[in-house]
């Protein structure tokens, strides 16, 4: 495990986002890093497409459409 130096403003944004998402600051930063890496590797996919693919790989199925609309 290493240490990543980021500027204070970015750290503050990670801290704020972590509260909204219910993640720790480290988990939020790791999430953003992973999503950013996946976006660079698959520039033609949208964020939603990447998330759907990664959730499917993890065995997470979305609820039926009617449950998502409600």
Image: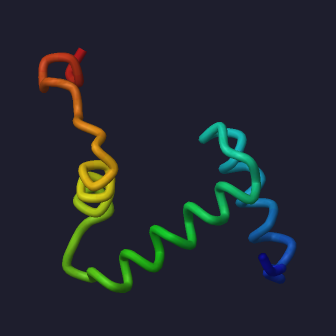
28 w.r.t. 39: above or below: above
How many numbered markers are drawn?
Answer: 0
Q: How is the image coloured?
A: rainbow
Give the left or right position of residue 14, taking residue 70 as reference: right
Residue at point 29% right, 63% down?
50
Q: Quadrant of residue 2?
A: bottom right
Query: Residue extending furthest left?
Result: 65
Whole-percent x, y for residue 45 in the image:
22, 72
63 w.r.t. 61: above or below: above
Give the left or right position of residue 16, taking residue 39 as reference: right
Give the left or right position of residue 18, taking residue 46 as reference: right
Residue at point 30% right, 40% down?
60
21 w.r.t. 58: above or below: above
Whole-percent x, y for residue 35 in the image:
45, 68
Give the left or right position of residue 31, taking residue 42 as reference: right
Whole-percent x, y for residue 19 in the image:
71, 40
Whole-percent x, y for residue 7 in the image:
83, 79
Image quadrant in which the C terminus is located: top left
Q: Quadrant of residue 66?
A: top left
Q: Quadrant of residue 67?
A: top left
Residue at point 83% right, 79% down?
3
Image quadrant in which the N terminus is located: bottom right
Residue at point 24% right, 58% down?
53
């Amino acid at each position: 495990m290493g240490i990543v130096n980021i500027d204070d403003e970015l750290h503050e944004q990670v801290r704020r986002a972590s509260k909204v998402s219910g993640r720790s600051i480290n988990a939020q930063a790791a999430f953003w890093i992973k999503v950013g890496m996946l976006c660079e590797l698959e520039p033609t996919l949208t964020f939603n497409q990447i998330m759907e693919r990664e959730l499917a790989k993890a065995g997470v199925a979305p609820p039926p459409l009617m449950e998502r609309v409600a």
